Every structure is written in structure tokens, then in C-alpha cells.
Amino acid sequence: MLERGELITAVDLPAIEFARNSIYLKVRDRTSYAFALVSVAAALDIQDNTIQAARLALGGVGTKPWRAHEAEQILIGSSPNRDTFEQAAAVTVRDANPRQHNRFKVDLAPRIIVQALSILSAAE
């Protein structure tokens, strides 16, 4: 527990071997803006044309970043192809409850997810 006046200056995270095949994509309104309209962080472990492990997280689409656990389960054990990626992306936004001015993110998020996963599968 932090004491009054203490500050966290670093965080060490254990290395995950398959994270070597990872990507972070950020969609911005304009290149001059630093914040993401939608972002995705993804990692895939592909062996023998089968996804062995997957991590998928989204930013910019809710009040905080979140991990897409259900999409990860769709990916694991599947072939790395566009149909699989589209299924994972669709389940990620299936229960979305957008507000008036951010409805476009429900369409944008799946596209960036499919793009990220496609890039990763091509890199394997």
C-alpha cells in the first residue's frame, strides 16, 4: 500500500513469450490528437495454423480499457482467418450500448480488431 506522498515510478510486468507477436493500433480523429477514438492491443500465438493463445484489449470505446475475454475464447483453437477474426470482433461489440455521439465506434472497433488480428496472422 502506498503511503501519503509516495509515488509509483515503475511497473515490472512478466514477459509473455507469445507477446513477441503483438500489435497496438490506435485510430485517431486527426494525427495531431494524441487520444484514440478506438484502440486495440492484441497478441496471438499461432502454431500449425491454429491459434494457441490470444490476448485482445480495447481502448477508447468505454470509460476504461477492457479485455475481450469472450473474443479470445473464440480465437483460441481456431484457424487464423478473416471469418474467425470477424466472429471475435462481432462478439466484442455485441452488447455495446453506445451514446448518441459515439455510435460510430460500434462500427469502427470491429474493423480495427480484424485489421490487427490480420496483421498478426500474416507476421507468423
Image (cartoon, rainbow, N blue to C red):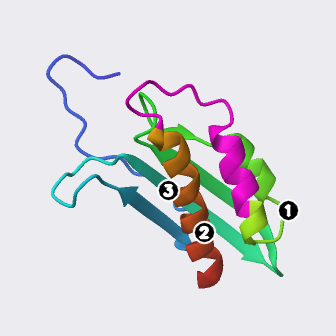
Front position in the image: 35 or 16: 35
Q: Which mark is first along the chain, 1 or 3?
A: 3
Residue bearing the label numbered 1: 77
Q: Are marks 2 and 1 in contact (CB under 8 Å)?
A: no
Classify 69 as above or below 23: above
Residue bearing the label numbered 3: 41
Mark 2 vs mark 1, CA separation in Å:
18 Å
Front position in the image: 54 or 117: 117
Residue bearing the label numbered 2: 17
Mark 3 vs mark 2, CA separation in Å:
16 Å
Q: Which residues are magenta?
A: 85-103
In the image, what residue type sits under mark 1?
A: Gly
- Percent coordinates x, y for residue 26 in the rendering: 38, 57
- The quarter in which the C terminus is drawn is bottom right
The local crowd at label 3, few if under 14, some if 14 to 19, many if 20 or more residues have their Cα within 10 Å, is some
Q: Please say whether residue 80 is one of the residues in the magenta stretch.
A: no
Give the foreground label among 3 and 2. 3
Q: Secondary structure at mark 3?
A: strand
- Percent coordinates x, y for residue 72 in the rendering: 71, 51
Q: Secondary structure at mark 2?
A: helix
In the image, what residue type sits under mark 3?
A: Ala
- The quarter in which the N terminus is drawn is top left
The residue sitting at 59% across, 83% down in the picture is 123
